[in-house]
Image (spheres, rainbow, N blue to C red):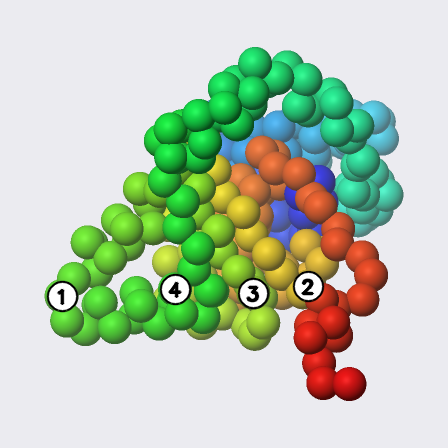
Amino acid sequence: MAYREVHMTEIKEILLRIASGYPIRSISRSLGIHRETIKNYVNSSLELGVDPKKDGVTDELVEKIKSRLAGKNKSVHIPRDNILLPHKDRIETYLEKGIKGSKIMALLARADKLFKHLRLSAIDGTYERTIGSYLRPDILIIDDFGIKEMTREEAGEFYEIILERYGKKSNIITSARSPEEWQALFPDPILGNSSLDRLAHSSYQILMEGESIRKQSRPK
C-alpha cells in the first residue's frame, strides 16, 4: 500500500507540537504516527517557506500541505525484480523445501468473523488468548476488510493487532475498497491514522483488475 489519506487535523496537531518544541520521536510515540510521516509534514511546511517554530501554524498552511501531499501520495508501481531479486536465494530455498519446510505459520480470517471472534472472547473471558492467536502467525491474512464501518471496539482491536505485529510479522489485507476509503471506516480519525500509517509505510498495494472470478462458476 503506498497511499494513506491525509487529514488536516493530523497535520495541524503535529505542526503545533513541532512549534511547541516537541521532538519528532516524542510526537511519533504519543500520537502513534510514523516518524517519516511527521518529517514529511515538517519538510512540506519548510518548502512552502514557513517554519512552524518561528512563523506559526495557520489553517491556510495546513491546507496547502494537505494539497501537496495528496498530489504525491499515489500508488507507486515498483518493478517486481527490484523487490524479489535481493531475496532470490531464500525464495529458492523455500520453494525447494516446500512451505512446511520453511516453518511459516499463516492464518486466514475474514474480517467480520475475526471481530466476532474477539467480541465473544471478551464475554467468556478468553480475550487475551484469542487476540494472541492473531498476533502469533508469521502471516495474517485478513479477508474482506472494510465491508462496513467499524465500531469503536472493532477499530481498537484492529489497531492493537496492527500495532503488535508491526515490524515483526507480515500481514495481507484484501478489500473491495481502495485504501483511500479505509480512513472513513474508523469512528476515531486518530486511531485510523495510527493504524493506516503503520500499514502505509511497510507494505505494497496490489490492484486486482478484471472480471470477478465468481462469474466463471455461475450457472450458464
Location of mark 4 (residue): 114
Give the SS element for disc 4: helix
Q: Is residue 192 above or below residue 69?
A: below
**Residue at the spot of label 2:** 177
Q: CA distance from mark 3 to mark 2?
A: 9 Å
Q: Give the class, few, some or many, for how many residues have Cα within 10 Å of label 1's Cα (few <14, many ≥20).
A: few
- Judged from this view, the residue extending furthest toward the left is 125
* Mark 2 vs mark 4, CA separation in Å: 18 Å
Residue under circle 3? 144
Question: For this rendering, which residue is in front, 198 or 194?
Answer: 198
For the point 61% across and 37% down, the residue is 203
State the image coordinates of residue 20 (x, y, percent, origin top left): 55, 32
- Residue at 44%, 41% in the rendered image: 139
Locate residue 198 relative to residue 161 in the image: left or right: right
- What's the distance in space between the residues labelled 1 and 4, CA to CA? 16 Å
Q: Tell me: residue 11, above or below residue 209.
A: above
Label 2 neighbourhood size at 10 Å, few (<14), some (14-19), many (20+)?
A: few
Dot 4 alpha-carbon crowd within 10 angstroms: few under 14, some 14 to 19, many 20 or more? some
User: Tag 1, which secondary structure?
Assistant: loop
Identify the amino acid type marked 3: Asp
Mark 1 vs 4, N-terminal side: 4
Residue 3 image point, x, y percent: 71, 45
The amino acid at mark 1 is: Gly
Q: Nearer the viewer, residue 89 or 59?
A: 89
Residue type (three-letter) at the residue carrying disc 2: Arg
Q: Which percent across, then down, holds residue 50?
A: 79, 29
- Using residue 125 as the reference point, say whether residue 97 is left or right of it: right
Q: Position of residue 31 (x, y in %)?
A: 47, 42
The image quarter containing residue 101 is top left
